[in-house]
Amino acid sequence: MRIAATADLHFSPQSYAKLKDQFERVRDEADVLVLAGDLTNYGRPNEMEPLLNVLLRLRIPTIAVLGNHDYESSKEEVLCQMMVEAGIKVLDGTAYERDGIGFAGTKGFVGGFGREMLTGFGEREIKQFVQASIDEALKLERAMAQLRTSKRVVVLHYSPVVDTVEGEAREIYPFMGTSRLGEVVDRHGANLVVHGHAHHGKMDGRTPAGIAVHNVAISRLQAQEPSAVYRIFEM
């Protein structure tokens, strides 16, 4: 299976023509398209609608998770319903199997990495913040536990490792992802992890157990190749 993966489209009606032209070749280059969050700019249905017009014309199976921008207008449930009705498989603590490949995904959350990971100690507000991070890790755990395939792909928006965050300002590392997600991946095993959010991070990294993690934020891809709108992985 050839998987085309991208993230952080931040789609708006103004970007319609450009993305439409750049995505036209994906059906010839891949069997599945994966969208790792921040599909819209402000999480509005009027941004999702033209994006769906682009995606439907591609005629390629599409798998997606939401990102933080998709939550901005508190319309995330509407956006998910629009995508599901368009035939897109939306992962939110859920799994999907296709042609012997298992996909598990969730948005993920922030919290930091390794020894610098925030813990739930102190004020109630800190505990609530950390609990949100734990809840997303548990959703990924649930999704991965559902898979029965030997080959597995994990789809996230936030990074599960610090490797692919390097390049961002160090002060914002804790807001780019959390090791809690990487711990789940290592516990269950995977062949490939893709995420977005780190617009200026590195493209490639690994979990502590050595599982490949790839940052597919479109701005990061285009920093290396201006015409790139996705990256191809073979399983």
Image (spheres, rainbow, N blue to C red):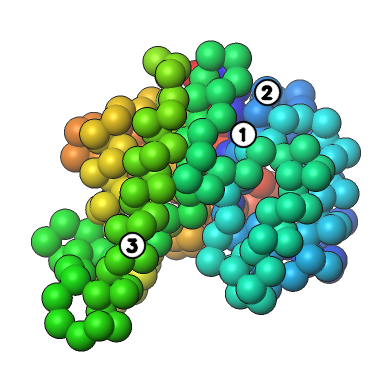
The amino acid type, in three-letter code, at marker 1 is: Ala
Q: Position of residue 70 (x, y in %)?
A: 62, 65
Q: First in sequence, mark 3 or 1: give its number.
A: 1
In the rendered structure, the answer to whether residue 161 lies left or right of residue 63 reads left
Q: Secondary structure at mark 1?
A: strand
Q: Position of residue 200 (x, y in %)?
A: 45, 62
Pair 3/1: label in front: 3
Q: Position of residue 197 (x, y in %)?
A: 48, 60
Give yes or no for contact between labels 2 and 1 (Cβ–Cβ under 8 Å).
no
In the rendered structure, the answer to whether residue 25 lies left or right of residue 111 reads right
Q: Which mark is residue 222?
A: none
CA neighbours of label 1 inside 10 A, class few (<14), some (14 to 19), many (20+): many
Above or below 103: residue 207: below
Q: First in sequence, mark 3 or 2: give its number.
A: 2
The answer to which image quadrant residue 190 occupies is top left
Residue wearing tag 1: 4
Q: Residue at x 56, y 23 (%)?
A: 97
Q: Which mark is residue 133?
A: 3
Pair 3/2: label in front: 3
Residue wearing tag 2: 31
Looking at the image, which is closer to me, 201 or 97?
Answer: 97
Q: Residue furthest left?
A: 115
Q: CA distance from mark 3 to mark 2?
A: 32 Å
Q: CA distance from mark 3 to mark 1?
A: 28 Å
Q: Position of residue 145 (x, y in %)?
A: 37, 31
The amino acid type, in three-letter code, at marker 3 is: Ser
